[in-house]
Image (tube, rainbow, N blue to C red):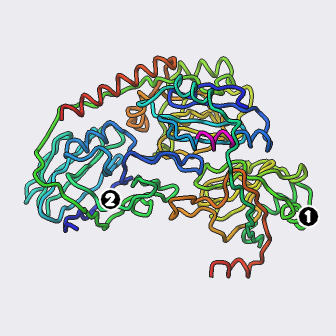
Amino acid sequence: MIKNISNLGDAALYCDFGTEVNKKINSEVIKYFNTIKKRNIEGINNLTPSYNKLIISYDLKVTNYKEIKDKIEKLNIAEAIKTNNKKIEIPVCCDPSFSLDMERLENKLNLTKDKILENFFKKEFFCYMTGFIAGMPFLGDLDENMRVQRLETPRVKVPKGSVGITEQFADIYTFESPGGWNIIGNTPLEVFDSSKEIDPNLINPGDTVKFKQITLEEYKNYNE
Amino acid sequence: MSKNYFEIIRAGINTTFQDKGRNNLYHIGIPFSGAMDKRNYLLANKLVGNKLNLPVIEFAYQGPLLKFFGDKINIVITGDVVFKIKQNDKEIDGNCYETYELKNEDEINILSTNKSVYGYLAISGRFDLKLQWGSCSINTKANIGSNDGKKLDNDQKIKISKVNENVNKKKINYLNSKIENIRIMKGTNFDYFSEKGKKDFLEKEFTVSKLSDRMGMRLEGPEIENIVNTNIKSEGLLKGVIQVPADGNPIIMLSDHGTIGGYPKIAVVASVDYDRLVQISPGSKIKFKEIELTDAETLFKLYEMETQNLLSQI
């Protein structure tokens, strides 16, 4: 349930579902997101679901805060919206040329490389949200013993396809971008396909993701 | 397919195609983009007799030098821009908000934006562009939009797919108003900042940093003191949101911003001031002024009416 609705500026509603990050709260956010998206409410021009917030942007030329807030409060969210959550396997190569922060992870986590990889690849991840850069999935949750902070100084350029971890989350850099996550490997898979007008994202909120380790050889031959 | 085109002799610093932008893609990480200064974008299209949602060329600081090849075409520049037009061997100073007819091998040389950032060039017709998610707007960070999502480069051609016939020459007198006081509403993390931090933010002057672009405007000034946490759990962003990272220097999100961010939101710029905010050039001073939501809504309505009035005069 939405705990509180407030305004974020004069053209958006800020729906607060709580402060914790967990699947239960996030599933509520996604349920609202899917319901509102389906309704095509006049004036709403964007929705941003995240771990525990939903931001609803609207066109101030067409509507205003009070009107949209009324409509959201009256929504019947109980009705089940069918979502087709997928299970997706992502190949990742952890050759030293890709796992840019392995040494740092070994030191910070006090685990061997093999143990880190074992923990990482046995985990089933849940996609909380996508964004920051186009198609980037935010996946959780890593076990307690795998949690590290961001790099103190973010990289100016993280290579495309990089798979990173930070706190309880993993992500995939769909484009070369600045970023501060600890890079563990690289996927040859196109996670965001900008030539697709519909569903350019391979991974969507609510989907389950499992990483699968591949060799450098397999990586090189992947797209051939 | 008409045989009209521009040859880019000099591309300029940040020259892109822009239109109204794209909606409903935040949830996959794609922002609105679109023309930074919407009023000047709309005026440009109206002056050349186009539909208001057609793509135009947006430039920043120094614009392009273009040579026209073809029969003839009307063009207009909007914003606060210094430019010259070369017809035959004669060069004349151009006026913004006045249409000019270009003939084969005429040139338009956009020298600079005058104490502002963005200017617009519209043609009476259509550029030959591929749309992506219903918009041509180029987002160079995600390589989305026309021209493979890249800014325009030297020695490129800009193809024109359609030229409108019988377009009247039009002009209006319009002076871009400048603002130094940016009106804002409190953000969702306003109380993350100390009493001194809040006071500094609302009362002190900030300088617009050179590190500003279509993604964001960075500010330098007093360090805004955070007493709760310099990070929040990542959540959605909007254009106009002012984030304060750990270094205490505010960043205002602009049209090509990342869609998710993890820094506290101290404030949000009122929609009424966005067109003029983006035109404030690096090195300039700005101050913030807090207003209530209802005032922001009323002020935006008035601004929108003014825009409609300007358009109806053309």
Label 2, residues with CA under 10 Å away: few <14, some 14-19, many ≥20: many
Disc 1 versus disc 2: nearer the observer: 1
* Amino acid type, label 1: Lys
Q: Are marks 1 and 2 in contact (CB under 8 Å)?
A: no
The residue closer to the viewer here, A178 or B258, is B258
Residue placed at 26% from the left, 46% from the top? B51
* Amino acid type, label 2: Ala
Find disc 1 in the rendering and name its residue: A115
Specify the quadrant of the image occupied by residue B20: top left
Is the residue B155 above or below the residue B253 in the image?
Answer: below
* SS at badge 1: helix
Magenta stretch holds residue B286: no
Q: Position of residue B84 (x, y in %)?
A: 18, 49
Q: How many marks?
A: 2
The residue closer to the viewer here, B258 or A46, is A46
The answer to whether any part of residue B218 appears in the image is no
Is the residue A181 above or below the residue B170 in the image?
Answer: below
Specify the quadrant of the image occupied by residue B41: top left
The answer to whether any part of residue B164 appears in the image is yes
Q: In this image, B172 relative to A204: left or right?
A: left
Find disc 2 in the rendering and name its residue: B11
Residue placed at 31% from the left, 49% from the top? B54
Q: Position of residue B294 (x, y in %)?
A: 48, 17
Q: In this image, B104 relative to B66: left or right?
A: left
Label 1, residues with CA under 10 Å away: few <14, some 14-19, many ≥20: few
Q: Position of residue B298 (x, y in %)?
A: 41, 19
Chain part drawn in magenta = A30-36
Q: Quadrant of the N terminus of chain B?
A: bottom left
Q: Position of residue A8 (x, y in %)?
A: 57, 29
Q: In this image, B208 relative to A17: left or right?
A: left
* SS at badge 2: loop
Residue placed at 35% from the left, 46% from the top? B61
